[in-house]
Image (tube, rainbow, N blue to C red):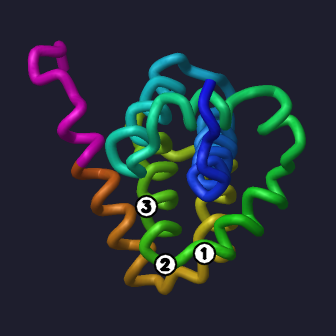
């Protein structure tokens, strides 16, 4: 395995911790939410497969807490933090509802990122648009 870029690894680790926290905040871990986290990391955050795999190792994520995740988000630029926020909201919207712990985690991330209300709302709208695009139009209502 070649050397993974430290900055990309930090982003990936932060993303996967934030995404996993949102994934379990609904009270259960759904495989589709985990798959969404991986796809979002690759497609929107631009992470390569090697970096994603390195970020998800027990040594990497096991050494971080949710407080570490929030500190990392606070240290990111606004554009990157907004992408993280949009991604976690996409995960929350995956089941068309938000549970109280999901709301709390979203609020904590938004505060750590220093997002304004307008920026936070933009992240929510973006997440809704992406979530809507992922719905199977042939599913029975």
Q: Residue at x 22, y 29 (%)?
A: 135
Mark 1 / mark 2, whichever is N-terminal: 2
Residue receiving disc 3: 83
Indicate the position of residue 136 as horizontal and vertical percent values.
18, 22
In contact (CB < 8 Å): disc 3 and disc 1: no
Q: Closer to the N terminus: mark 3 or mark 2?
A: 2
State the CA–CA distance, disc 1 to disc 2. 7 Å
Q: Are marks 1 and 2 in contact (CB under 8 Å)?
A: yes
**How many numbered discs sit on the rendered protein?**
3
Q: Secondary structure at mark 2?
A: helix
Dot 2: within a 10 Å radius of its alpha carbon, few (fewer than 14), some, or many (20 or more) residues? some
**Residue under label 2:** 78
The dominant secondary structure in magenta is loop
Q: Report the front residue among 130 and 57.
A: 57
Residue ID at (42%, 73%): 79
Q: Residue at x 39, y 48 (%)?
A: 46
Q: Position of residue 39 (x, y in %)?
A: 39, 32
Q: Which residue is mark 1?
A: 113
The residue stretch that appears in magenta: 130-141
Q: Quadrant of the N terminus?
A: top right
**Residue at left offset 59%, top offset 72%:** 76
Question: Where is residue 52 drawn, in percent x and y?
Answer: 56, 34
Residues under numbered marks 3 and 2 in contact, where contact means CB atoms less than 8 Å apart: no
Label 3 residue SS = helix
* Of pointers 3 and 1, the one earlier in the residue sequence: 3
Residue 133 covered by magenta stretch: yes
Q: Residue furthest left?
A: 138
Q: Residues within 10 Å of mark 1 (few under 14, many from 20)?
A: many
Label 1, secondary structure: give it.
helix
Residue 39 included in the magenta stretch of the image: no
Q: Quadrant of the C terminus?
A: top left
Q: Is residue 56 above or below residue 85?
A: above
């Amino acid at each position: 395995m070649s050397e993974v870029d430290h900055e990309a690894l930090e982003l990936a680790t932060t993303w996967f911790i934030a995404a996993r926290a949102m994934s379990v905040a609904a009270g259960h871990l759904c495989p589709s939410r985990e798959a969404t986290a991986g796809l979002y990391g690759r497609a929107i955050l631009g992470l390569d497969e090697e970096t994603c795999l390195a970020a998800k190792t027990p040594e990497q994520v096991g050494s971080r807490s949710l407080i570490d995740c929030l500190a990392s988000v606070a240290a990111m630029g606004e554009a990157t933090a907004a992408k993280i926020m949009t991604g976690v909201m996409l995960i929350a919207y995956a089941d068309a509802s938000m549970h109280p712990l999901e709301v709390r985690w979203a609020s904590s991330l938004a505060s750590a990122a220093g997002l304004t209300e307008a920026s936070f709302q933009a992240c929510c709208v973006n997440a809704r648009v992406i979530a809507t695009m992922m719905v199977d139009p042939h599913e029975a209502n």
